[in-house]
Each structure stands twice: as C-alpha cells, then as structure tokens.
Amino acid sequence: MSSRGLRRLIPAVIFVLLMVIGFGSARYLAAFKVERGPGSLAVGVSPGVREDVERLVAAYLSADPECDVTLVESDGTHAGLLELLRSGAVDGVFAETDLLERAGLQPDAAGFHQARLLSVDFPSPHRSVSLEEARSILAELEAGRPGPWPAAGLAVIGLAERSPDRQLLSVEGVYPTLDTVLDGSYPLATEVGFVLRRPSGLAAALSRLPGVGTWLEPNRAVVRAFAEWLGTAEARAAFHGVTGEITLAAVGDVMLARKTQREIDKYGLDYPFGNVAELLSSADITFCNLEAPLGDTGTPIPGKGIWLRGRPEFVECLKLAGMDVVSVCNNHILDYDSPCMLQTLDLLTEAGMVYVGGGRDEKDARTVRVVEADGIRLAFVGYTEFADSWLFWDYDYRRTFLAGEDTPGCNPLDMTIIAEDIARAKEMADIVVVSFHWGWEDIPYPQAFNPKNDCVAIAHQVIDLGASVVLGHHPHIVQGFEVYGGGVIAYSLGNFVNDQAKVHQKEGTILELQLSPEGVLSARITPVWIESTAPRFMEGDELRQMMEKIERLSAVFGD
C-alpha cells in the first residue's frame, strides 16, 4: 500500500478504535451507575446496628425532610456487605468495624459505638459480672432462655434504651456509660463505621471527567452531604441516643463532730472519706447533707439537748472528698445559733462548694443553686420538716430553724414554696434535684415527722412538678428507693460519716445517677458500712445482703 493510501486509512482506523473504546467504556461505566434520583439515598446496615442507624437517619431526615433514605439490611456477613456495595444497591454501609475489616474496607466515618448493656430491675442485688459470665448470659438470652436470675427481669438494652428502672450491670468492673462505651473500656462495646461506595480502577478515573461523575451518581450531592453530616456531634448523639451525660453522686448525713472529730485528730483530714473519696471525686457533681455546722463561734441553743459542731478546718474534709453541693437544711445546722451557721456558709463558699436549702436569710435560703458540668445544668433546692415557726426547744428562747427576713435558717417543707421554687428551677436548669431532711429516725420506711405530711405523696408531687431526683436524709437508716414518673426517689440515703452505734445506723449508701439534659438515664446504689465513723465499701456477703434488704424495702413502692 502506498504511503498516500496509508495516510487515508489511519484516520478511519482511529475512528473505529475510538468508537469501540467509547462503547466499551460506556458499558463498563454503566456497571457502576447508580439508579437513584438526585434526592435519594440508600444505606446498607448490618443487622446488629439497624436500630441505631434508624435513629440516626430519623435525625438526619428531621434536618433535611426533602431527602429520601432507604435502609437495606445485609445478611450479616462481610461478603454480604461487599455485594451490596459492588451491585450499587446502596451508596454506603454501616457495620461493626471488625466486619468491615474482614471485608477489607476502611471507614469513611467513625466515632460510632454500639453497646449491649445487661440490665435487671432496679434496685437489685445483681450488680456486676465477669466478661465470661456476660457472654454466657448473652448466649442464654439470645437462645430465648431467661438467664441465671429469672426473677430479676434480666434483659439486654442499648445506650438509648436506658431508664432508671433498669439497673445496669458492670462487666469486668466497668459500668456502662457513654464515656466507657466510647473509650472502649466497657467490654461489650463495639465500634461502628460507615463506608462510602466508590467506583474503583478505570471507573474512578473516568468518573472525574466532566459530566461523568454526575451521570454515574445522580445523587452524588446528597450522598456527600450525608457523609459530611456523619462527622458532626449531632450525628453521634443521634446514633448513641444521648447528647451527653454526667454522673451525680449523692450521700446522706455527714457529721464531723464528737467521735468523728477525735478520729480526724488522730488520722488527719482525709480520714472521714478516705475509703470512698476516689469514687465520690470521680463523679461530675457530688452531694451530701452536712449534719453539723462547722465553726468556732456561737453558743448552744437552749433546751435542744444535742449540740453538734465541727471545727472550721473540717471543711477541708468535704473538699478532699470532692463535695460540690452541701445541704445545710437540717435540724442541727443552728445548734450553735446564727453565728456558727453564718460561719459555716462562709467556709463552704470559700472552699468552692455550694450550699442549698438554707441561707443567711429567707431570700438566700430559697435561692436555686445551679451547678453545671459538661454543659448539663443541675438545679438544687432543699427543705426540712424541722423549720417551722411552732418548732423550738425553749420557751424562753423561741429560736426556730426557719429562715426569716433578716435571720439565717432553713426552708420549710411547704408545698406552696416548693412548687414556686421548682418552677423557677426548671427555667434555670436541665435537671431539678430536691433535697428533703425529713421523717422519723430509725424507721426503715418513710414516715413523716409532722403527721400532716406524707413523704411518699410529697416525693411524687415534686416529681410531677418537674423534678427528676429526690434525695432524702435524716432518719439515720437506709430506706427504700423508688422510680416514679421517670425520676428517682431516695427516701433516706442513711448515714455516711457518723458515730452512731446501732447496726442500721452504720449502714449507708452512695446513689450514683447518670443524667442527660432529658432526665435520669440510670441509677445504681453502692452500700457502705461505717466503721469508726468512716464509710467503707461493703463486699461479698454483706454487700449482697444489704442489696437484698434495699430490694425488699423498695418493693413496697410502685410507679
């Protein structure tokens, strides 16, 4: 063939080759094309995380109601995930990271965690299990069997399903909270990731050509917007079912006088709380009732019979224990009259603690105290049955504990006042905590000191008014706990630091509550035994027996 003929043939050959390549490329790219509209999104999910992803998608759709999201459940295998992506049935997949790793996939969005929480009815003597026991329980429940404690209401729930009537079990000593799930220390937590579907190889290169990417993925914009949203705090909160949470730890009567004072003199200021300070300090907010004033001023109120007062430097004991909120609303805060109560308030304030339920005058006593931790605000108010105008100890010196216009004292247990205060507190905070110093001493069931009062009815009423937590103290004995209207009621937390000698007076509790801006997530009780005035954790049989007692005392209450 002449050179002239060859020159004529070359363009024709090139044209044919381009037609073949173009046709082949089009067919090749068509295999990667997504058949979904611009506002539609398909998300694959492994069966184990479907409920969490459903909650996440609902939150996304509330922000973008024009988007249409379809969930496609995989068969639970890594091969099934790969097939969903390869076929174009989904735009991305959510799955446990170990499943993604077996499929050779790297998450485009991480920071999501799913947890299986073992729970029983609250309160229960069943508090913790080993990892081996936990796995055995899970297998029992998955097989449809009731597990080792048929009467305990054993169930598996997720973070979003927590409620105060479900007592969560620690696993290997780790209690399930949002923090312990996110940091991986809770053994039954699993990390979850999201992987986007992407063209690979030649398709990936061709998809970058003008118009090709949009042709391949008509919904590319909505897919990218969804993937970007997954990196937000809002998305993580939706997946986990909680925006954030904190721990409130509450204990009962703390009396830093008499024998306690002598023990402090011998062993130091860290003695009273030394055995339990680590737990108390680890809480975001810690509460106690200060059963004796602190100071070196004032004189005993005539006729009272029992006068308690700790030295000024004992405020350091509270500080070392991590106390944040201290009730001064009780029947001993004025044992040494106004000067010592005022000194106590000064000492607490200077130490960085907030006092509640009492004050320099009526206005100060009724001030709602708001304490914030990690953006969650708790409002504290306090009242006592022992602040009434008719209650005094000497007719020649009629000093009541009721705060007056110019007189230090406490808030009375008056439902009109309480309703007004709770209404104000709700406007100022996410959670309202009500403290009551009430009841007869040494009785295991709530019985009001004033016959016109009904402790149970009052507790229910303050929950109905909008409080989430009721903390009772004064009886010097542990009473029952109740979950009512989504709130938690401790009718009497019992003693905590005290020198009383009867067996029930040496039993106490630490109530730990996980709180979110929406309310109480979970509750657990840690019993203590007071030995030489200082609490220590109960263990073994004494712990089990004490929790069984609390379970019995609480069984009389019902939501």
Image (cartoon, rainbow, N blue to C red):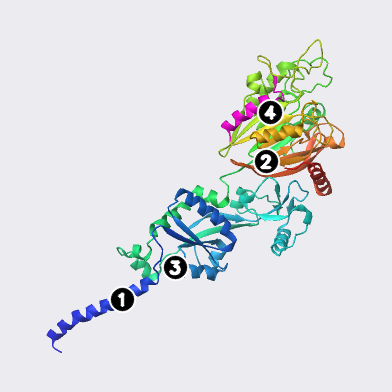
**Residue 12 spot, x, y in % from top left:** 20, 81
Q: Is residue 152 left or right of residue 178?
A: right
Dot 2 or dot 3: first in sequence order is: 3
In the depicted view, which residue is nearer to us: 12 or 219?
219
How far apart, in angstroms, are the residues tagged by discs 1 and 3? 21 Å
Dot 2 or dot 1: first in sequence order is: 1
Residue farthest toward the top in the current orientation of the protein: 396
Q: Are marks 1 and 3 in contact (CB under 8 Å)?
A: no
Q: In this picture, is 86 found above or below 257?
A: below
Secondary structure of the residue carrying tag 2 is: loop
Residue 252 in view in this figure: no
Q: Amino acid at mark 4?
A: Gly
Residue pointed to by mark 2: 485
Dot 4 or dot 1: first in sequence order is: 1
**Residue 92 spot, x, y in % from top left:** 47, 62
Dot 2 or dot 4: first in sequence order is: 4
Secondary structure of the residue carrying tag 1 is: helix
Q: Quadrant of residue 496?
A: top right
Residue pointed to by mark 4: 382
Q: Which residues are magenta?
A: 408-429
Residue pointed to by mark 3: 88
